[in-house]
Amino acid sequence: EVQRKRFIGGNWKSNNTLAKSLELVDSVVNKLEFDNLDVVVSPVSLHIVPVQQAIKNNVQVALQNIGHKGYGAFTGELSFEHVKDLKINWVILGHSERRRTPEISESEEFIANKATLAINNGLSVIFCIGETIQEMEAKETQAVLEKQLNPLIAQVKDWSKVVIAYEPVWAIGTGKTATPEYAEEIHANIRKLLPDQSIRILYGGSVTKDNAAVLIGQPNIDGFLVGGASLKEDFIHIVNACK
Ligand code: PEP
């Protein structure tokens, strides 16, 4: 059977003053002790360098988004060259807050193209997918996930640089965590679509210190992408549950 190294991501979203982000490094990130796990935190891009410099252990940092081209005339965008120059290895792409916020509305193709560009240039990507409550109720979950994944599957060659985060939109920031049975079923279905058994599939959506242990006990759940609980001490308990 394939062994998959567990992965825990902390998505800090668009929160915190710089002082608060650095306090979070001191009070949570630098308290983490682990080996044989990947732990990655994702502050806003403006904070990423000071956060990276303040980290004293093997926790890595991730950008929350990346531009669709390399260096050039793309005012306001960050390119993979900027990211690589600062030795940042990870990028979150396709978060539902970027797919589904009406003013942002990133398309499946746009996200998959950005992911492919990042991967082809040596970065690793946390690729988020997930259905809305309406889609789940209409039994469209599998179709939605395939629509989000297919443009990636069509382009990516090096899957060692990809982690999939299954995040049902109805579970994000709502306290309505997917049941372990539901998450496991969806993860198993996602795994069938992927070209390689070694690709990690994370669950995201109201993961807490209280539900982490039972979720990580599911055979197809390889870790978490954590929002709210990554902004507090609970993140330490979640990482510990994955050891
Ligand atoms: C997320 O933002 O990726 C997320 C899963 O948020 P939360 O843990 O707060 O539901």
Image (tube, helix red, strand yellow):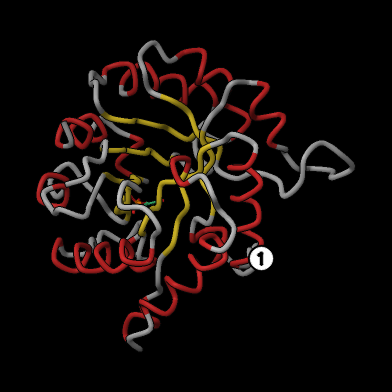
Depth order, front residue of 61/44 = 61
Residue occupying image coordinates x 66% and y 65%: 103
From the viewer's perspective, tell me whether residue 72 is left or right of residue 65: right
Residue drawn at 22 percent across, 45 percent down: 2
| Residue 59 x %, y % | 38, 23
10 Å crowding of disc 1: few (<14), some (14-19), many (20+): few
Question: Residue tagged by mark 1?
Answer: 103
> Farthest residue toward the bottom?
138
Q: State the residue at coordinates (61%, 58%).
A: 111
Task: Assign a secondary structure to mark 1.
Answer: loop
Seen in the picture, residue 222 relative to 238 is either above or below; the reply is below
| 144 on left or right of 203 | right
Given residues 47 and 122, the one toward you in this image is: 122
Q: Amino acid at mark 1?
A: Glu
The quarter of the displayed image where residue 154 is located: bottom right
Position of the C terminus, as image quadrant, is: top left
Residue 29 left/right relative to 118: left
